[in-house]
Image (cartoon, helix red, strand yellow):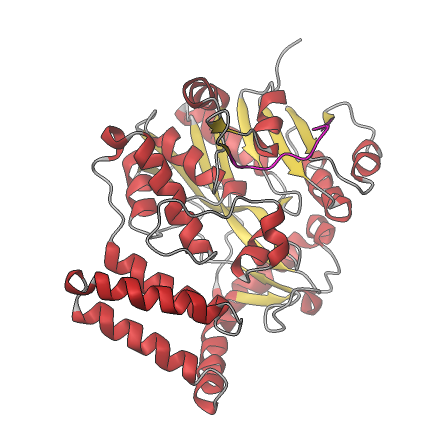
Amino acid sequence: MVNPLFSILIPTRNRAYLLGDALHSVLSQSLGDFEIIVSDNYSEDNTELVTKSFKDSRIKYYNTGKFLLNSWDPENKKYMKSNWDHAYSKATGQFIWLIGDDDYFLPNALENVKRIIDKKNAKIVISGIITFYDKKYFDGDLKDCVQAKCFTGKIFEEKANKILKLYFNLDSENGLPPHPSGFCINKSILDRINEKYNVVYPPVFGEIACTCRAMLLIDKIYNLDKPIVCVRRTNVSAVTKLLHNDDAMWKDQEKDCKYTIFKAPISLNFHVDTLLRVKNYEPDQFTAYEIPLEKYVMEYYYQLNQILGEKDVFQKYRKDFIRRINELHVKLSMHCKYSILVCDFKRIFRKTFLYFFSNIVRNIISKSSKIHMSDLGINNVRDFDDKLTVLAVALNQQSKIWNTTEPAIYDK
């Protein structure tokens, strides 16, 4: 039996009501050379029923048999395998593409990526995403909206060390570092990672650790600057819970920041802690990459105010921050200290007219990058299949942030 070209991995837990859309989007692809691995992390809902209702032999359902937590096992001194690793272990395809159970492939996604693989003998292809905020999303300004950047439709050849630099510099550029659902990688690279580390997706952010290690094994990747995946944001999305410090998030995630200076449970800390774990495991491999102290300090305090500013626990972490800042005092520039004061000022005036006015300005500026689904008559994610052209035209009319043409190979 010939192995498929793509293994589409969909780790899931208790989100059967979202999973169906993800499965439908894969099965609707113009290219059929794939298998779908649904790794069910011991769900208590009807995930298995939803999966098997599609009655397609390319869908393979696996239950983990027990709840898998992505964490370090101190007794055996190794990482416990996560649901993501469980999905990887079942894959037989030449290329691995892991997407969230609440995400959605846009039409011709696999065909677009296969074209790059064939033409450039690519081992890793990353692609653009659009973000869909559903009707129940907590932020009323984003609710029922699609948001995207300006896409060129081109394919860029990128050096692998550029990805590492962006990660460690806490930077982003032209869709890099890649979103996990827009990351397609040759299975042989993941096999080498698994053989060496006995885990592919270690805590805290497995996709960051995996990508960094993969970048050590290749020289270049290909970046398709075109929307290929729709990333859905709901009130139960992992990113939403993380960004807004939902206590429920920590049932499924290790929350101990072992290596960071500050310890608040916010997304920046888990990003940085993941990078430091990777670096500390192999310091010789990552000597060229450092996390800029001042940038980390400023971004940490900004997130601390934004995410925990209204919570009782905020003062605890703020006191810890001030204490450690005093220890780092001589290492921080006036620019950094000034930024911290500005952050405090914004927190104090959070509920005043000044803060309200700044939000109005921000919303006006960002309006060009989103469009309400209801304006297009789109009621759910599956309507993208039938109304993609309408959506593309509407977005182009507003701010030219969509490109519907087929990409041309473009070497940077």
Which of these two is toward me, 170 or 332?
332
Q: Where does the image place residue 67, in percent across and percent down from the top left?
A: 68, 35
Q: Is residue 2 above or below residue 130?
A: above
Q: Where does the image place residue 209, in percent across and percent down from the top left?
A: 42, 36
Q: In the image, what residue occupies the spot 46% across and 41% down?
A: 407
**Could you tell me which quadrant the N terminus lies in?**
top right
Regarding residue 278, the answer to whether it shows in the image is yes
Which of these two is toward me, 50 or 385?
50
Does residue 119 belong to the magenta stretch? no
Q: In the image, what residue occupies the spot 52% across and 29% down?
A: 114
Q: Where does the image place residue 253, in percent across and percent down from the top left?
A: 56, 45
Regarding residue 155, the answer to whether it shows in the image is no
Q: Is residue 71 left or right of residue 34?
A: left
Which of these two is toward me, 173 or 48?
48
- Which contiguous range is marked in magenta? 62-72
Q: Is residue 46 left or right of residue 398?
A: right
Q: In the image, what residue occupies the spot 30% across and 66% down?
A: 323
